[in-house]
Image (cartoon, rainbow, N blue to C red):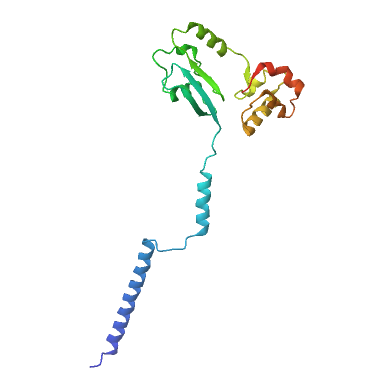
Amino acid sequence: MLIPKKWLVVVIIIFMIVFYFILHSDEELAIEHGDQINSDPLLEDKNELEESEGVEVEEEKWAVDVKGEIERPGVYNVERGKRVVDVVELAGGFTKEADSKFVNLAELVYDEMVIYVPNREEEALNSAVSQVNNDSRVRVNTATVEELMTLPGIGEQRAQTIIDYREEHGSFTSVEDLLNISGIGEKTLENFKEDIIVP
């Protein structure tokens, strides 16, 4: 029995529609399941750049020795800019016998610093600690521009040069390191070397 031409056309159209939907659904399924192997190289480079920018440069660490009436005495490596109060908290705080009034909690820490916390019975030692805390000499590794300007022969521009050198090369380890700074010679250094503390 011959199929009428009209029905044959209808069957062909239906077959084409079904084939189109099958092909289209396969493409969507491949996208949903992540079957696209080739990724955009520009996008990968962007992601790698963002990841590399997210890596922080390790900051300089200073070793601080905490002794006396402290819960966990020892040597702690702390970041620049920390204060004595931060190190005390890191070491667990004061003991019940600590005489904390002789400890300057607001003082900026520096490399190789020793923080000694006396007990309430150490009157003689308390007097010595008080004299240390009242030391008027300038610590060149932590001093600000204003503090450096109190030194003989050091103006604002020279003080900023010292800080810039310190930030670029790290902490000074000896008084002679200051001779590496442009504008500071032996004569200039001689004028203020008794007024500074290094390190």
Outermost residue on the left side: it is 1
Outermost residue on the bottom side: it is 1
Q: Is residue 105 above or below residue 79?
A: above
* x and y percentages locating residue 165 in the rendered image: 66, 31
Classify residue 116 as left or right of residue 17: right
Q: Residue at x 55, y 22 (%)?
A: 113
Q: Nearer the viewer, residue 166 or 14?
A: 166
Q: Is residue 65 above or below residue 18?
A: above
Which picture quadrant has residue 19? bottom left
* x and y percentages locating residue 69 in the rendered image: 44, 16
Which picture quadrant has residue 192? top right
Which picture quadrant has residue 186? top right
Q: For the C terminus, give its image quadrant.
A: top right
Q: Nearer the viewer, residue 89 or 158?
A: 89
* x and y percentages locating residue 123 in the rendered image: 48, 6
Q: For the N terminus, give its image quadrant.
A: bottom left
User: How many numbered circles does the render carry?
Assistant: 0
* x and y percentages locating residue 51 in the rendered image: 50, 47
Classify residue 86 as left or right of residue 6: right
